[in-house]
Image (cartoon, grey):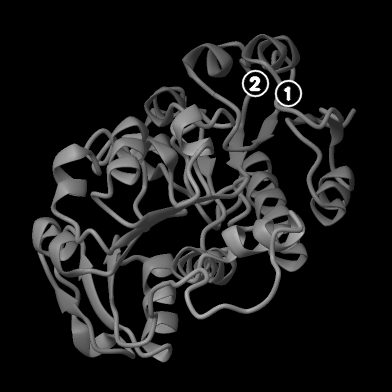
Amino acid sequence: MKPKVLVTRIIPAVGLQRLEEKYDLIVNEKDCPMTRAEIITRVPDVAGILCLLTDRIDGAVIQASPGLAGIANYAVGFDNIDIAAATARGIPVSNTPGVLTDATAELAVALMFACARRIPEADRFVRSGAWHGWGPMQFLGADIAGSTLGIVGMGKIGQAVARRGHGLGMRIVYHEEARLDTAALVFPARFLGLSDLLSVSDFVSLHIPLTEKTRRLIGRRELSRMKPTAFIINTSRGQVVDEAELARALQSGVIAGAGLDVYEQEPAVKAELLQLDNCVLLSHIGSATTSTRDRMARTAAENLIAMIEGTEIPNLVNPDYISHRPKE
């Protein structure tokens, strides 16, 4: 009898087909996340879980699966999983780093252009039938070239955004927990404290994981330090920005605009943000290219196979799990 694997949402076929070669799959075929209760009822006899960032894999889920050999997250971030609970049970957890770097970086740059050049506003204007021809004062926006791009979180995605910004003629400043070796970068970049970065940047792009330290990192005080002509872009995690304070800042002109692909209470979006023309809102599509999602599916599948088969795990996020495994 093949081991069972739970896949909490339909993923690209390349991933499902790889898993089907070895395991009996339990796949949620609804186009919506499983509830926590639904997950708990399906995990007691599974050897592996392939989950999405919309799934909360907490201690109760982990405890409900006595034979669980691994959890593969179909995402780079893994704040949806109780890593401590998994580690305490001796269960490895993996993610899909690297494969979505370029797609997410491209979307961040797209949001910069959409905000600066007021593209969604102009599109709605044309579709409404209100446009009656070119005018010299219509939809005046901000320049990209010659502006300063502040990167908060200079990991792989942050660096990919910075490279693209540099190619567009932007000055690059960044904030990271530790100063990087700039000689290793292929573009000039200046390290700044967060407060200084916010005050000098024309565009602030967030590329940080969600931790207790970064939760609501951007709030009223941080937004007040930004230029009134500046834009903030978030393609990381919604909870790193205080959405209520962001809405107030956009309404009152504290900053010029925002581009969001992620939200605090996703998929719910704060009502005030929905009413604002200076806020571009996307539906969490940072990694949404066909090739990227295929690579994510393949990577997650290979990660899970390695966990169940007991071979080297390519993208392990909790190496301490091994010390908690029962002695054979």
Displayed quadrant of residue 182: bottom left
Amino acid type of the residue that numbered disc 2 sits on in the rendered structure: Gly
Does residue 328 appear left or right of residue 291 in this picture?
A: left
**In the structure shown, which secondary structural element does the residue marked by tag 1 occupy?**
loop
Image quadrant where one finds the N terminus: top right
Write down the residue under mark 1: 46
Amino acid type of the residue that numbered disc 1 sits on in the rendered structure: Val
Displayed quadrant of residue 49: top right
Write down the residue under mark 2: 67
Does residue 31 appear left or right of residue 328 in this picture?
A: right
- Residue appearing at x 55%, y 65% in the figure: 107
**In the structure shown, which secondary structural element does the residue marked by tag 2 occupy?**
loop
Q: Residue 211 or 219: which is nearer the viewer?
A: 219
Q: Residue 97 or 104: which is nearer the viewer?
A: 104
**Are dots 1 and 2 in contact, CB under 8 Å?**
yes
Compared to 54, does 98 lie above or below? below
Compared to 311, does 10 lie above or below? above
Compared to 181, does 17 lie above or below? above
Badge nearest the viewer, 1 or 2: 1
* Residue 90 seen in render: no
The picture places residue 154, in percent across and down from the top left corner, at: 30, 67
The picture places residue 80, in percent across and down from the top left corner, at: 49, 31
Q: Residue 162 or 203: which is nearer the viewer?
A: 203
